[in-house]
Image (spheres, rainbow, N blue to C red):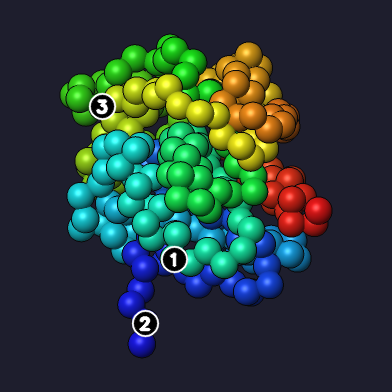
Amino acid sequence: MPDVNPWLPLPPGSPDAHPVYCLPYAGGSAAIYRPWRRQAPPGIAVVPVQPPGRRERFEEPPLTSAVAMAEQAGAAILPTLRGPYSLFGISMGALVAFELAHWLSERGRPPVRLFVASYPAPHVPRTLPRVHDSPDSTVVELLSALRVTPPEILASEEMRNLLMPLIRADLAVTETYVPRVREPLRMPVTVLRGVDDPHLSEDSARAWSTLTSAACTVQRFDAGHFLVHERPAEVLRLLAAPAAG
């Protein structure tokens, strides 16, 4: 029996389908993409990526660096690649997907397209305060105001206490990130922006265009920050476009 890859807890799907490796937002897990597995259009296979510290990996210490998360995810994904594939990430997951695209490109296996949702270009100066090392009450208050963590998590004291180490680690991933000067990516980048998302302006979405030598497009949705939950069918149709040619 083959060893289970903890980063890829679900089987990749049909070998003839175009894999889309999907990274979660802060505080989220691979489980957010389980419904997509059933809803995906023909031709693509949604492959959820599970970082440590959540669900079946709860007892593992969560990572606090986008670079480290990309390196470890990349080492798990690289042996599974058989043909063209894409990467998708939302919010924190978008930052990790960006670093992952660089890591895999440096090893000769770049994605054919990078999809980044609900996150400004990584070199755009942060406007949000640093809270990952603040008291719990400060973290919860800010996350509630910013609406960047699912409200059902913050509403439950038990869930907050259980997930606070993970939430802090995920916040550190974005708050401690330092952009690096390097060659731009060479694959097209598609930015997904909810028009009601207060944390992704049109300018910061368009700024992704400076990070690739290929085309960069901004796709707008009638949604907020969590467009993966608000507009799943529309997002999946967009992800299927490269596979459909």
Q: Which residue is mark 1?
A: 79
Identified at 68% across, 67% down, the residue is 17
- Element at badge 3? loop
Res. 130 visible in picture: yes
Identified at 77% across, 50% down, the residue is 241
The image shows residue 43 at horizontal and vertical percentages of 74, 64
Report if the CB atoms under discs 3 and 1 are less than 8 Å apart.
no
- Residue 32 horizontal side relative to residue 206, left or right: left
Of badges 3 and 1, the one in the foreground is 1
- Residue 28 horizontal side relative to residue 118, left or right: left
Q: Amino acid at mark 3?
A: His
Instruction: Give the CA separation, mark 3 to mark 1.
Output: 34 Å
Neighbour tally class for label 2: few under 14, some 14-19, many 20 plus, Cα within 10 Å:
few
Query: Which of the 4 image quadrants contains residue 45?
Result: bottom right
Neighbour tally class for label 3: few under 14, some 14-19, many 20 plus, Cα within 10 Å:
many
Taking depth in this image into account, of 132 and 43 the one nearest to the observer is 43
The image shows residue 209 at horizontal and vertical percentages of 64, 24
Q: Amino acid at mark 2?
A: Pro
Taking depth in this image into account, of 19 and 235 the one nearest to the observer is 19
Res. 119 visible in picture: no
Q: Which residue is mark 3?
A: 132
